[in-house]
Image (spheres, rainbow, N blue to C red):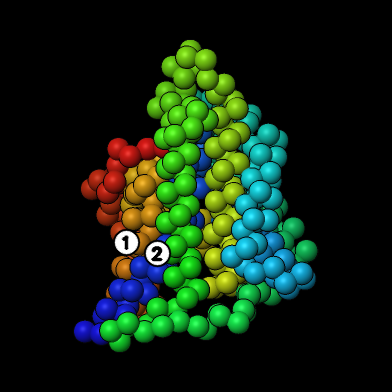
Amino acid sequence: MNIILQNIVSGLLVGGVYGLAALGLSLAFGVLKVLNIAHGELIMFGGYIAFFAFSAIGVDPFLSILIVFPVLVIFGLVLHGTLFTHIVRFEEEDRIKNSLLIGFGLTLILQTIAIQLFSADERSILTAYSSAGFELGGIRFPLIRLGALLLAIVSVVLLEIFLNRTWAGRALRATSENWQTAALNGINVRQTYFIAFGLAAGLAGLTGVLLATGFSVAPSIGLQWTLKALIVVVLAGLGSIRGALFGGLLLGVAEALSAYAFGSEYREIIGLIMFVIVLSVRPQGLFGGDHA
């Protein structure tokens, strides 16, 4: 029983990272109705920034979020202003198609740039507390993974506060519901698109920090983490913010239990199975109706 509980706890702790990875992708889709396939590359660059901030000037990885988040927000604003802003004038179906094409091209470009800048080697951050943790009832809780789950929860809470308590956040919500009506009510729709895409990129950067500390970063990880985020977004419901974290936790536990029951080679398969089942049976997602 302790082994099963340990796997559930481990799945929940990893699931927090999955949820944070999906949060930015969900926000961008919920507001702009674009699917940024290069989301994983933004995660990857966030991880590299955290790694070099730690190795070059000794910035603690959890403090490096103060550097990573604004840098990725600015990068996201540049990407939107140069690439994605041209497709938001299309109808929703054409937005998705064109954003997929742009995202695939951007993925190849960012991967190539990362290889040239950082080489193809995997990098990870090892701190004095990397292997630290504590036991409770025979269950081990690694501090790094607990910190990752806490950061994911705080990010969701702060994003919810921003969306519900600020004028800019309410503008994002109105635009996600109906951009024409939002524009008629005096909301600068183009500005809200910039804000949403910048925030999505910043959240991707935070996920990269967690990967650099608890996993590893390399130029090739982008597609893997885009797929993870997309699975969680489908589980949660397209555009669902609060559901993204719960979807990530669900996927983490499912992967951990399937690896325990059937072997580690089935860890990745369970997510794809859940993806297909939910998309077929409940296309609005398990938490559908809760949108940005």
> CB under 8 Å between callouts 1 and 2?
yes
Quadrant holding the N terminus: bottom left
Left or right placement of residue 145 versus residue 286 in this view: right
The kind of secondary structure element at disc 2 is helix
For this rendering, which residue is in front, 241 or 132? 132
Give the residue drawn at x 55%, y 67%. Answer: 211
Q: Residue at x 55, y 23 (%)?
A: 189
The image position of residue 272, as x and y in percent, is 36, 61
Mark drawn on residue 250: 1
286 to the left or right of 107: left
Task: Locate residue 167, reporting x and y percent.
Answer: 50, 28
Q: Residue at x 42, y 49 (%)?
A: 157
Rendered image quadrant of residue 78: top right
- Three-letter code, disc 1: Leu
Kind of element beneath mark 1? helix
Name the disc covering residue 108, or none.
Answer: none
- Real-space Cα distance between discs 1 and 2? 7 Å
Q: Position of residue 253 (x, y in %)?
A: 32, 68
How many C-alpha atoms fall within 10 Å of the one at disc 2: few (<14), some, or many (≥20)?
Answer: many
* Residue under label 2: 15
Q: Is residue 166 visible?
A: yes
Tell me residue 7's x, y (percent).
32, 78
Left or right: 113 in relation to 73:
right
> Considering only order in the chain, which callout, 2 or 1, is on the residue closer to the N terminus?
2
Q: Is residue 123 above or below residue 285?
A: below
- Judge whether residue 238 can be spotted in this image: no
Which amino acid lies under the numbered mark 2 shown in the image of this protein? Gly
Give the answer, above or below, for where 150 lies relative to 96. below
